[in-house]
Amino acid sequence: MDSLDLLIDLHLSNPHQGPGGDAQTELALRLTGLDPAAPLTVADIGCGTGAATLALARLLPRAHITAVDVLVPFLKRLQQRCEAVGVAGRVAPLQASMSALPLADAQFDLLWSEGAIYHMGFENGVKSWQRFLKPGGVLVASELTWTTDTRPPELQAFWDAAYPEVATAADKIRVLERHGYSPLGHFVLSETCWRDAYYRPLQAGFNDFLSRHGHSEAARAVVAEHEQEIALYEANSMYFGYGVYVARRITFPQTSHLSP
């Protein structure tokens, strides 16, 4: 079993594959200004096993949601979860890479991506996905963000190497404005979204995961990597977190000439 298969197996049974929470999803949705009773078209990009998809399906009872992930086991688990709560008819799983989405231009009222856009980079993601939004459509994305102006040099060096796009909220908002969005709101996920929703369930499954894989060197390496990540967050949570960014696609008027 290769490292990707091991990662899938470790995360498959968890409700969240990254920091988040239903209350935070609901807050972000309110910031969009969209009518929750409208028949909205929504894409959840990098949906994992469907934590945000299920919350959106509950909060948007007339929406049709395209749930996109590159990993088939995650989509199969999402389908099971949707069937269990009776929303499978409004959720369409789609196996695709977020960097090559087989979606139509101006197809969606709402693009959603929690804890996933970093896979292709924040700037590349917001730039590439903008065309899938209808004029006036809204993007919601959570992204690794510095929450202070200064931080320990060793922490700065770690994230500069691991994810060079880590930046402050002001920097992220400038990126959105540069690529045709008007920011509507921003907030930082609470530590509960990291510890209770993501890390604690993950840690609770480490022993079973190791047992399933015979405590192999590869499995132990996967656990060690996650333990290092958790320790990094626990020691430095005052310096970084996930910012949630809500922004509307700007529609510029088309003119054939300048007025005199």
Image (cartoon, grey):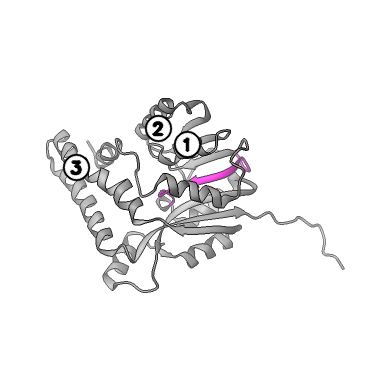
Report x, y in % for residue 21.
40, 46
What's under tag 2, amino acid-wise? Answer: Leu
Outermost right residue: 260
Mark with earlier residue (1, 3): 1
Residues tagged 1 and 2 counted as in contact (Cβ below 8 A): yes
Which of the two residues, 15 or 226, is positioned nearer the viewer here?
15
Mark with earlier residue (3, 2): 2
Report x, y in % for residue 59.
51, 39
- Residue 107 on the magenta segment: yes
The CA span between labels 3 and 2 is 22 Å
What's under tag 3, amino acid-wise? Answer: Phe
**Residue sitting at 68 percent across and 54 percent down?**
251
**Residue sitting at 29 percent across and 35 percent down?**
13
In the picture of the structure, the residue carrying the numbered disc 3 is: 206
Report x, y in % for residue 49.
38, 36
From which residue to which does the magenta span run? 104-117
In the picture of the structure, the residue carrying the numbered disc 1 is: 67
- Residue 128 on the magenta segment: no
In the picture of the structure, the residue carrying the numbered disc 2 is: 78
**Residue sitting at 46 percent across and 32 percent down?**
93
Q: Nearer the viewer, mark 1 or mark 3?
A: 3
